[in-house]
Image (cartoon, helix red, strand yellow):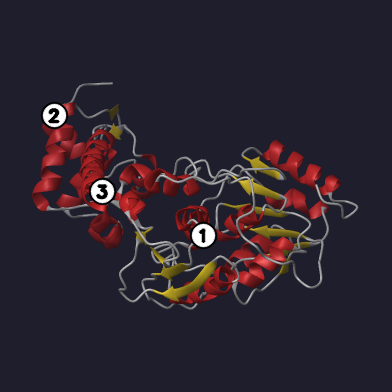
Amino acid sequence: MKKLSAVEQLVSATGFSGIAGEDIFFRRRPLYFMDISGESFRPTRFVCWLAWFWVRLVGVNEQKYKDAGWNSYAEKLQFKFFKFYLSSRLYRVIEDERLARISARNFKHFCENGKINQIELPPGRELTFKHSGTGGDIIYGLPAIKALSEGRPVKLFLNPPGRQIDEPFKPEPSHPFNLQMCQMLIPLLEHQPWLASVQIYNGEPVDYDLDVFRRIPNIKTGQHSIAHWYFWIFAVSADLSRPWLEVRPAPVSSQRIVLARSARCRNCNLDYAFLREFGGIDFVGTAAEFEEMKQVLPELRHAVCEDFLQLAQTIRSARFFIGNQSLPFAIAEAMKVPRILEVCPRLPDVIPTGADTGEAFFQPNFEKLVKSFWEKTRSGASF
């Protein structure tokens, strides 16, 4: 590997040779570049800092870069430098330092001004909570809400961004919780006897803002259990091995496997084709997700649900449930039905607790779990 000058490194690295834009955002690790002669090189620390200074000078940031699109700005110098900056070995260090500063500031502000655990209320007074989603986060937040209420009446406000889209079950990733999603979730939440009411948020003052964890970067890293994030902040705990959603089974129990696989949080190591040997599988999810899975499982049947209460009843009546880290699995986990989780290696922030569960990380284990669950429920008996 030959040694290049700083100018030669910048010229070669910003020429976009041998690297794809999407690789940058997913790898975020030191990459080799190709010089004009085709030899690889790793940029020096000085060149990395020079690229960082240029990025800050021209005001380019990652969100702007993503929104603008790779192809539209491929020939602009500031975006070439930004591509180089993202690929450099200092990017991760610089980003970690920036997030650490933000986290420290937010923690200090939270401790000084939050006073979350110093609320003194008269006995019997109704407690109010606010949550802005997503649906799964709300389900995992219910144990903390119930623990904080200590038997008092609870009013929960849902705060969607208000943007309507055509697909009600699973909105776009950039808008994962909209008004239509709230309307589908409200029947399930109102079905819980300890929740006095569930309403759309219109700026009312609340006792507990459950969105506070989103302002602390350390908690948003896809680590540990989502339900525990609320425990950390509000200094409460609950027994997550016991059900915290009360839902009656569907009037007619199908005793079919229920499957859900959203577009996000997938494990690319898992192949569902082996499920063809198991008869009777219902899919819950969007039409697009169903059509994608139907290419793998031609005999798959789409169980269309009008709202999430009906979704919960479908899962409650299943022989057992299989799903990735999504709202359907959150519901299955909250009801403690027999369930198998497709673990996402990139964001393992869902940890099943209690009995009658399994976690599929590798293909052999996935197949073993499904066969085990199938045998245990062959005669219709519970676990």
Mark 3 lies on a secondary structure that is helix
Q: CA distance from mark 1 to mark 3?
A: 26 Å
Image x and y of residue 344, in percent: 54, 45
Mark 1 or 3, nearer chain start: 3
Q: Amino acid at mark 3?
A: Phe
CB atoms of marks 2 and 1 within 8 Å: no
Task: Give the residue at the far left of this rendering.
Answer: 57
Secondary structure of the residue carrying tag 1 is loop
Q: Nearer the viewer, mark 1 or mark 3?
A: 1
Measure the C-alpha gap from mark 3 to mark 2.
38 Å
Closer to the N terminus: mark 3 or mark 2? 2
Asked which secondary structure carries label 2, the reply is: helix
Q: Amino acid at mark 2?
A: Phe
Q: Nearer the viewer, mark 2 or mark 1?
A: 1
Tell me which residue sits at (76%, 46%) in the image.
370
Checking the image for residue 110, the label placed there is 3
| Label 3 crowd bin: few (<14), some (14–19), many (20+), radius 10 Å | some
- Residue at left 82%, top 54%? 278
Q: Position of residue 348 (x, y in %)?
A: 51, 42
Between 306 and 191, the residue placed more toward the observer is 191
Where residue 8 sits, quadrant-wise, is top left
Q: Which residue is situated farthest in the right direction here?
A: 379
Circle 2 is placed at which residue position? 46
Considering only vertical position in the picture, is 1 above or below 216?
A: above
Residue nearer the viewer, 60 or 111? 111
Q: Which residue is mark 1?
A: 151
Between label 3 and label 2, give the one nearer the viewer.
3
